[in-house]
Image (cartoon, helix red, strand yellow):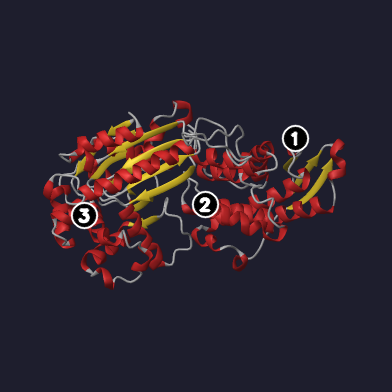
Amino acid sequence: MAGAVDSSGSSTAEERAPGRLAGFGPIGVIDIGSNSVRLVLYERQSRAPTPLFNEKVLAGLGKGLSETGRLRDDSVDTAIAAIRRFRQLATQSGATKLDVLATAAVRDASNGTAFIEAVTDICGGDLSVLSGRQEAELAALGVASSFYHARGVVGDLGGGSLELVDIDHDRLGEGETFPLGGLRLSETAKGSARKAGKIAAEALANAASLKAAHGQSFYAVGGTWRALAHLHMHRTGYPLHIMHHYTIPADEAFELCRMVVRTELSEIAGLEVVSRARRPLLPFGAAVMEQVLKIGRPKDVVLSAQGLREGHLYADLSPELRAEDPLLAAAGELAELRSRSPRHCHELGPWTGEVFAALGIDESEEEVRLRLAACLLADIAWRAHPDYRGEQAVAMIANGAFIGVDHPGRGYLALAIFHRYAGSVSDSEMPAIHQLMSARLKFRARILGAAMRLAYGLSAAMPGVIPRTSVVREGERIVLHIPRDFAALDGEVVRRRLDQLADLADQASTVVVS
């Protein structure tokens, strides 16, 4: 049922669309940065928040700030028009909360107070002008919320400033801020990327946060650094176009940055994949990253698509919600929305754990959480045509807005569900994402897919069946036990799928009804 809109523009719908989850929301965040102004509306308060709407306007509030100390009138006009539109969008979306966060440009400008008053008139009183340390903390919390056990240093490069903070899971160090944002640095360096590198080297020489980066990961937040990573992704022919958790070895990232700093933009191969709006600042982001890598000596650069806004939401969660696994939370939400029986998806977790034990297949802690997440995602493609369910599942998982999982782990999830639908196929028939996975992960994804095929052959996706069955090792055989009141389930399909599962582990199998 389409919702009506009242005179204020807010939704008066009494019914929620079936594809939406209940909870406190929508929640809106307007992020007023030195280069861009962005609105993100999230479905609800959650451990794995899902964007309902996301729009950015490159207002360039920080342009000329280093020279004049003021926000330019044309930039202010562009930002105010965007914020007025964002406020209307939030209202008509029924947002229960709209927070406005302003960063370096507004914080440092002599006419920042007048701008704040104009924004407050539009949005109300919930506007926070963040200090540099607060920016660093929220960016780090955004990383903490979206990576499983993040350890290293978080760097958030905006238009006006660079924030650095060391991170160990949820524990944050003292944040630092530097006047090295892309817009500001390009002006300070008079348009010279090489000069920008020297300025960055001097500013970061004694950065306390970078001491914690040695041998650890450097988590890169910010549009310019994502554009740099997009260029690397294109030049290397990477098979997955998901930026979050994209990982570049430090030596490769360093060479890419050196090349970008020292090459005319028009001569950089593959630059067409970078948006035109981002290109002018690319060399300056590269200059800062080059010095971060040189001084900090991390093992790799890990891209984060989540930062200050998500950190702000994470800080508002209860301790109980913050303690949830973000991957399992996201997968559980998809089970609620997409599966025929969410309860059945949850039953698959312990049941497949017993199957792995019976087959003698060990799992690390990380592999266990991947298997549990895959079980929650096992039924997401059931509405597709049977011939294309495997492909559909791969597309949904490979391109899904998951957090808390790296790219090989994402490959495991996709490949397990692919095998659950398509059966065991050769490497040449598998989706390209398998290229990101180790042989160990591929084997375990194949086993899990086969176990799921057996489970669905028994249950038809309905709850309460597989917990009453068991797969155990008895002597030299893998035995499927079916209770007598379910004896009719024993048949050619179940026995064939059990044989296929056991064959993968070089075992014989049989069915016992008792």
Q: Amino acid at mark 2?
A: Arg
Which quarter of the rendering shows the N terminus?
A: top right
In the rendered image, the vertical position of residue 508 relative to residue 126, given as above or below = below
Location of residue 122 by image quarter: top left
Q: Answer with left or right where residue 255 lies relative to residue 496.
A: left
Q: Amino acid at mark 1?
A: Gly
Q: Amino acid at mark 3?
A: Gln
Q: Which residue lies under the disc numbered 3?
A: 291
> Residue 52: x percent and y percent?
49, 43
Q: Earlier in the sequence, mark 2 or mark 1?
A: 2
| SS at circle 3 | helix
Crowding at label 1, few (<14), some or many (≥20) Cα neighbours within 10 Å? few
Q: Is residue 96 visible?
A: yes
Q: Which residue is at 16% across, 53% downward? A: 201
Q: How far is the residue under mark 2 from the one under mark 1?
A: 29 Å
Q: How far is the residue under mark 1 from the one under mark 3?
A: 58 Å
Q: Which residue is at 83% across, 37% downward? A: 483
